[in-house]
Amino acid sequence: MLVEETLRAASPREMVDHHFDRAAERLRLSAEMRTLLSTPFREIKAQVPVRMDDGSLRIFTAYRVQHNSARGPAKGGIRFHPWVNEEEIRALAETMTWKAALVNVPFGGAKGGIVCDPAELSEGELERLTRKFISRIHRLLGPYRDVPAPDMGTNPQVMSWILDEYSSHYGYTPACVTGKPAELGGAPDRMQATGRGVAYVLSRYIESFGHPLKDLGLKVVIQGFGNVGSHTALALAAEGCEVMAVSDVYGGIASRDRKGLPIPALAAYVREHGSVAGFPDTRPVDNEEILTLDCDVLIPAAVECVLHQGNAPRVQARMVVEAANLPTMPEADEIFARRGITVIPDILANAGGVVVSYLEWTQNLQQEEWDENKTEAELRRYLSRAFQEVSARAEAERISLRQAAYEIAIERVAQAERLRGA
Ligand code: NAD
């Protein structure tokens, strides 16, 4: 099966259900609590008409799913991607609930998306699309209701339009969205936060065996070189890792020798050319081959469901660090467990984004401004605590890191629901 067919056939929803059911079983949650926790409390499907540059009217389909708000306002990114669909957004919204609970920030989970290819839209069309979407759903958003953030295909400029559109209804409200530029109250380094967090969680894992990451020169392969993938690569290269191959939607590149790619130069090349493809002195690899290259650490940082039973037996990495949400299908998880390949799950590995979003939100509410050092120190503190809790539980109960992470998160949300009267 081609990669694209596999991705389209896969169901992120089934994956989330699978992880939830396994954790709920061991936590002995009642049937009512299982239904309450696994069902989104509110879903919106909006029709978004946009006047295109050529004068035609195009109707886009958009979603916002608020999965759970027992522990705080719903929180989660907005994705612009051609494959966005209801089931995917539902699954990602639920994943956000568990992620926020795991790192213990006072948020619930949400996700949104618009079915579109941002690369095909002009700046003006993107702005009109974003504003129209927010004008359709603004009553359900707000600093204490639902706070969007960037995800695939969206960036600080899109967050700025969201801020402006929301503020046109309610007055200036910087805490209504995170991932904004610093000039509008964005946390310093929010865009780098998820990738840096991925690198930090990996370094904590390696350190737990008594080795500083810097000493090992691990060979790393990364699928996806957008916000998360590129900042993961930069952070790991700075920690002495050798990034051997990277890819994006247009293709991939691998080092021609045993030395890592020059990541800062590659990031500059991508800013100029829009893709990693064609970077000098490398050999091309495709998005399927990249997952099975020889390396120590494989980091999926693009789309869901890329690791499945078809390619998991051929993965050569000793460790998979899930920078993307839901990249590993349950059958692949089982194959990795049998083969002794450790998986650091998405809700832990990529939680740096939601932590820094939380820091941004609190600063906006208190009209405070922190510097980069304070933000970075807090990011590390939250991720370090979550890592310790997950690894301690996994070790004590002899379960996988994913199972431990889901159990901790679900327990917290279930307790919040009970205390609130469920
Ligand atoms: P992005 O749009 O900045 O980058 C996505 C990258 O994936 C790009 O390099 C793109 O070319 C590539 N890509 C897209 N479709 C692909 C395909 N079919 N095959 C291979 N590559 C493909 O997005 P991002 O913000 O870096 O998000 C990447 C992943 O990380 C997503 O799963 C997202 O949900 C997750 N994530 C993002 C954040 C965040 O703060 N942005 C936080 C947590 C998790």
Image (spheres, helix red, strand yellow):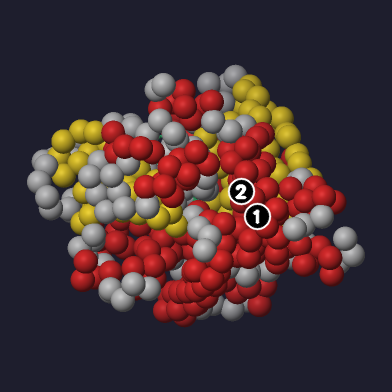
58 in relation to 39, above or below:
above
Left/right placement of residue 367 relative to residue 124 reads right
Binning the other alpha carbons within 10 Å of mark 2 as few (below 14), some (14 to 19) or many (20 upward) gives some
Residue 160, position as x, y percentages in the image: 56, 53
* Residue at (20% x, 41% y) in the render: 254
59 in relation to 268, above or below:
above
Residue 421, position as x, y percentages in the image: 90, 65
**Which corner quadrant of the figure contains ligand 1?**
top left
Evaluate whether residue 355 shows in this view: no
* Residue at (52% x, 26% y) in the render: 8
In the picture, the quarter occupied by the C terminus is: bottom right
- Near-viewer residue (334 or 139): 334
Residue position marked by numbered label 2 in the rendering:
19
Callout 1: SS: helix
Callout 2: SS: helix
Residue 180, position as x, y percentages in the image: 53, 59
Disc marking residue 187: none
Residue 289 placement: quadrant:
top left
Residue position marked by numbered label 1 in the rendering:
23
- Near-viewer residue (105 or 113): 105
- Contact, CB < 8 Å: mark 1 with mark 2? yes
Evaluate whether residue 17 shows in this view: yes
CA distance separating discs 1 and 2: 6 Å
Binning the other alpha carbons within 10 Å of mark 1 as few (below 14), some (14 to 19) or many (20 upward) gives many
